[in-house]
Structure formats: C-alpha cells, structure tokens
C-alpha cells in the first residue's frame, strides 16, 4: 500500500475501518484536523481521501457537522456492479482458484468485443470457484487486458477480492459497465463444480466492466447456483 499516493493510503485505511464495523452508520469520522494529526499529512490530502469516500458511498459530508458514516455499500454484481463476494449477505465466503492466471490471445470476451488496444496486449485469463459455508455458489471466469499490470500473474488470488487487488495495487477502479443475464441448464463442467444434475437451472451473467483507465475493461462470466441463499443488491 506504500506505493499508493498518500490520500489513497488514508482512503484505504478509513474504508477498511468502515467495512470492519469500527465506524458504524451514523458515526462521525474524526475531523479533518484530527485526521491530519493522526496520519501526519496536509489537510488537502485528508480532504481528497474523504472526497473519495463520498464518491464511493461510504460517507456523506455535511457542512458544520463533518463526515457521517453511511456504512460499507452492499450488494453486487447482480444489480450494482460491486464485487461478487458482496452478492450474498454472508461473510463466510471463500474463493478457490481452479485455474491460475495465464496469458492468452483473445478476440472477444463472452460475446463482448474487446477494444483494439486490449486485443493487442493479450489477455490475462483465470477461473475461480466461490463457496459459502463450504457449498459452491459461484463459478466465474475472468479476462483482463495484460496492460500495465506488472507481476499480476504472480499474485495469490485465493480468498482475495479481485476488485480490491486491482484498486490497491494498480489503482484500477471500477466505474460502471454492462451485464447480460441468462437462464441456462448445467453442462458437464457446471455439474462437476456445483455437484448438481444434468439440466439443473443456473444463472449466467456476462459482464463488461468499465474502469478509470481508458481502454481497460474487466470481462467476466459468472455462473450462480443459489437456491439455498438469497442474492442481495441495490439499484
């Protein structure tokens, strides 16, 4: 994290405290002056960190009152393009890497055409299985352009959030995107991962996610079997 600009380091620390419940909805964050003293930085640095927290919906700011915690945004990918790990209202979600990141050529990604500059640099491809209380719930395939992501192939993504890794290590931030939803029946691959019978209904999502980097998108295909759990999301 030391490689991040100072304001982003402070943002990450405050964000982590909010996500962990150290600050709960309705709490006031320390004042700008107190944060400057605590982190030994200039007021402008603290202000930029707070502005980013506002933009990401963690806090609201009121003139004369200060920074009021809203809480960690909930829901996901299904409706609001947050990370898949927040799609279920349960923290006991683990990630198993079924295929480690590797370089591939590509021309399209799950029906989405890739940008010419993305096609030119090649694709970082990997697959993951998500389990809730030990039961498989999500199986996802991810494709990233091999663009200014040094040493990404060496990162351990086991039980890690991809979006958090991209944000904290590479300053790649999700800004929006599009997704397509399909109702399909399980093929042999999905039967194996989810331990279900042939023809079992599965929810499939194809996603093209925009980021703060021009010409850099995150492409993913997610399969969900959640008959025992409710998906949550906001829109």
Image: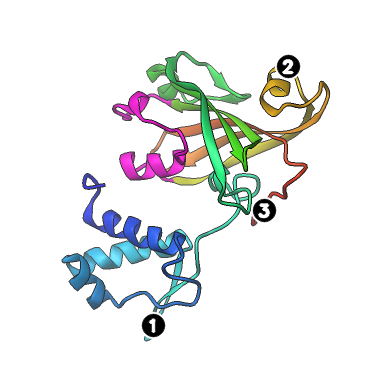
Q: Secondary structure at mark 1?
A: loop
Which sits earlier in the primary sequence, circle 1 or circle 2? 1
| Circles 3, 2 touching at the beta carbon (< 8 Å) | no
| Residue 148 left/right relative to 117 | left
The residue that appears at 41% across and 67% down in the rendered structure is 22
Residue denoted by label 2: 188
Quadrant containing the C terminus is bottom right
The stretch drawn in magenta includes residue 152: yes
> Picture quarter containing residue 48?
bottom left
- Image mark for residue 63: 1
Q: Is residue 10 above or below residue 86?
A: below
Mark 2: few, some, or many residues within 10 Å (few <14, many ≥20)?
Answer: few
| Residue 34 left/right relative to 69 | left
| Residue 81 left/right relative to 173 | right
Residue denoted by label 3: 232
Which of the pair 159/207 is nearer the observer? 159
Report x, y in % for residue 156: 39, 31
Q: Secondary structure at mark 3?
A: loop
Q: CA distance from mark 1 to mark 2?
A: 58 Å
Q: Is residue 197 above or below residue 174?
A: above
The residue that appears at 54% across and 39% down in the rendered structure is 94
The residue that appears at 34% across and 66% down in the rendered structure is 50
Q: Secondary structure at mark 2?
A: helix
What's the magenta region?
145-173
């Amino acid at each position: 994290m030391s490689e991040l600009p100072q304001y982003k380091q402070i943002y990450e620390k405050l964000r982590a405290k909010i996500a962990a419940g150290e600050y709960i909805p309705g709490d006031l964050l320390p004042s700008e002056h107190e944060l400057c003293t605590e982190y030994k930085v200039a007021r402008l640095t603290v202000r930029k960190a707070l502005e980013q927290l506002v933009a990401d919906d963690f806090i609201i700011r009121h003139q004369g009152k200060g920074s009021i915690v809203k809480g960690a945004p909930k829901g996901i990918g299904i409706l609001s393009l947050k990370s898949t790990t927040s799609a279920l209202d349960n923290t006991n979600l683990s990630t198993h890497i079924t295929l480690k990141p590797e370089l591939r050529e590509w021309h399209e990604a799950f029906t989405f055409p890739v940008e010419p500059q993305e096609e030119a640099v090649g694709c970082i491809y990997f697959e993951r299985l998500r389990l809730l209380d030990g039961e498989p719930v999500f199986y996802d395939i991810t494709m990233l352009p091999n663009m200014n992501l040094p040493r990404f192939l060496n990162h351990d993504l086991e039980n890690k959030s991809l979006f958090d890794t991209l944000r904290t290590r590479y300053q790649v931030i999700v800004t929006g995107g599009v997704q397509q939803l399909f109702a399909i029946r399980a093929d042999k691959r999905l039967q194996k991962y989810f331990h279900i019978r042939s023809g079992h209904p599965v929810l499939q999502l194809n996603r093209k996610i925009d980021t703060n980097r021009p010409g850099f998108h995150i492409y993913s295909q997610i399969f969900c079997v959640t008959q025992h759990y409710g998906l949550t999301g906001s829109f």
